[in-house]
Amino acid sequence: MSEKEQRPIDGNSEPVPDPRDGEARELTASLRGVAELMDRISRDMQKAQLAEYINLMNRPWQLIWRNFLSGLTRGIGIALGFTFFAATIVWVLQTLGKLNLPIVGDYIADIVRIVQRQLQINPY
């Protein structure tokens, strides 16, 4: 055996390069780079919560339940938001109607009367 090559401990026929060799230093540096890259990928996967996503995909009923609750809360939020928005507009129109503005006041008063009549006809 040459002095740059040593016999490996596990009995492989492949010689292990001498650590003082330039080729071995390059190999060690590239392995360190690969290890750092793997660490970074592992951290990114943990940040992305990929394991939790895969677990969720393996439990379809839990996914359906979460989507149902999500849709229900969105629907309630939209209904409440629209109710608040519509009530605010009706209130503003009533306030403008009380000001007795010449042309705009009559138009707004008609709109308010129509809305109030519609509410009396169809009580929910």
Image: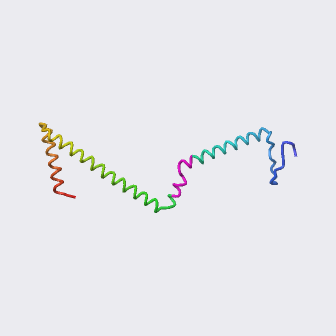
Foreground of the two, 98 or 36: 98
Tell me which secondary structure the magenta stretch mostly adopts. helix
Q: Which quarter of the figure has residue 19?
A: top right
Along the horizontal axis of the image, is 47 left or right of 78? right
Q: Which quarter of the figure has residue 70?
A: bottom left
The residue at 15%/49% (across/down) is 114
Above or below, comparing residue 64 to residue 93 in the picture:
below
Q: Position of residue 38 (x, y in %)?
A: 63, 46
Along the horizontal axis of the image, is 36 left or right of 58? right
The residue at 38%/55% (across/down) is 71
Which residue is at the far bottom?
Answer: 61
Give the quadrant of the C terminus: bottom left
Which residue is at the far right?
Answer: 1
Is 50 one of the magenta-colored residues? yes
Q: Position of residue 40 (x, y in %)?
A: 60, 44
Is 67 one of the magenta-colored residues? no
Q: Position of residue 41 (x, y in %)?
A: 60, 46
Query: Which residues make up the magenta segment?
Result: 44-55
Foreground of the two, 119 or 11: 119
Which color scheme did the rendering employ for the protein? rainbow
Along the horizontal axis of the image, is 13 left or right of 74? right
The residue at 69%/43% (across/down) is 32
Q: Position of residue 98 (x, y in %)?
A: 14, 41
